[in-house]
Image (cartoon, grey):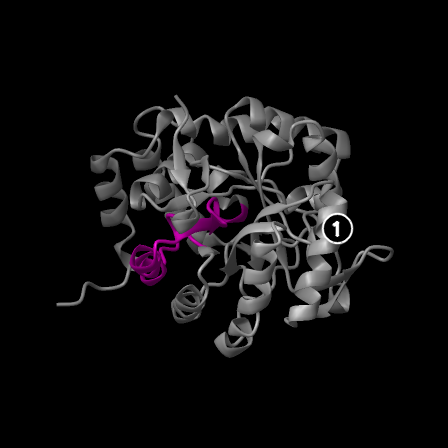
Amino acid sequence: MSMTRTLGRSGIEVSAIGMGCWAIGGPLWGDGGQPFGWGEVDDDESIRTIHAALDAGVTLFDTASNYGAGHSERILGRALAGRRDRAVIATKFGNRADEATRRWTGTDPSPAYAVQSLEESLRRLGTDHVDLYQLHINDLPATAALDLVDTLEGLVAQGKIRAYGWSTDHPDSAEAFAKAGTHCTAVQHDQSVLLDNAAMLAVCDAYDLASLNRGPLAMGLLTGSKRAVGRDDVRGMAPEWLVWFTDGRPTPEWAARVERIRAALTSDGRTLAQGALGWLLARSPRTVPIPGARTVAQVRENAATLALGPLGADAVAEVERLLSDVRPAPTA
């Protein structure tokens, strides 16, 4: 029996682990040659991967308008043709990209662009509605996000989206959005066994939001892969926020922490990745990890966690003991 969870107050049921679709978008470039993708992709393998995910019980697929400058949405749409009723689609808006040149061209938080971007996403996805529509500008001031609420509520009323949320790591921002928006139902944030955002999970509890966990495998660090990545991969020229990799290789101090917790995460026969996902499922009943995948093998390994379920209490306690150096000190 596959595990399911509810997307906050929307009541939408999803598999407890989703599939992140950033990597299947292929290359995207920012200023100064900064890569915003994960390198070249095989579109046929991407489609096989999405089909394998569905067959393994995965129902939530998370993409964005700018992943591969729209390519991720196109591929997801192709893969879900004739299967749309089996999938819950989450996409994002707020980052502009040029499809012809595959370049990121900046952010646009305006209500008008939220509407325009949705129409473009629906066309690429080949569907008449998106289940979860997420603001994709992490550091946007909350006042600017609140200016979007009426527009987003209008899109719900029109049946073009079922619910909305914000991809942000700032608990205060998520709280303001949730307070203002009746159909705000989720926050997507960085969350993994290596990086616990307890304050965000508290906001999710307070406002009945789902916690969509991006980076649940620390951008691949928690798969145990030692392979160096190329310069067309975001990890090859890691931006400031991406601490797990340095010049395409695992950052030594973080790699050492992974080795420290490996035995606890794999103690019941899981792979390292399955242990890391199991830790997230044990962390809160609201968490929905969305690990990226671009091969059938990767998505099958991730989805097998649906049958394994949350990591056991003893293993979780051992992980917390071993990672006390990256956990906040308890407050009296």
The structure residue drawn at horizontal position 29% and vertical position 59%, both measured from the top left corner, is 206
Rendered residue at 41%/25% (across/down): 2
- Return the x and y of residue 312 as percentages of the image width and height: 25, 33
Q: In this view, does 84 lie to the left or right of 170?
A: right
The residue closer to the viewer here, 105 or 79, is 79
Q: Which residue occupies the foreground of this view, 150 or 200?
A: 150
Which residue is the extreme one toward the left?
332
SS class of the residue under badge 1?
A: helix
Q: Return the residue nearer the eye: 284 or 297.
A: 284
User: In the image, is residue 262 above or below residue 166?
Assistant: above
Give coordinates of residue 198: x percent, y percent: 31, 58
Image quadrant where one finds the C terminus: bottom left
Residue 278's quadrant in the figure? top left
Question: Is residue 232 something one can see in this rendering?
Answer: no
Above or below, 246 relative to 319 = below
Q: What residue type is labelled 1?
A: Gly
> Is residue 215 covered in magenta?
yes
Residue drawn at x 30%, y 29% as measured from the top left: 267
Q: Where is residue 52 in the image (x, y as percent from the top left)?
A: 60, 24
Q: Among all residues in the image, which is located at the extreme front?
A: 157
The residue tagged 1 is 70
Residue that appears at 52% across and 59% down? 167
What is the magenta range? 190-219
The image quadrant where one finds the N terminus is top left
Disc 1 crowd rating (10 Å Cα; few below 14, some 14-19, many 20+) is many
Give residue 95's position: percent from left, percent from top: 68, 63
Magenta stretch encompasses residue 4: no
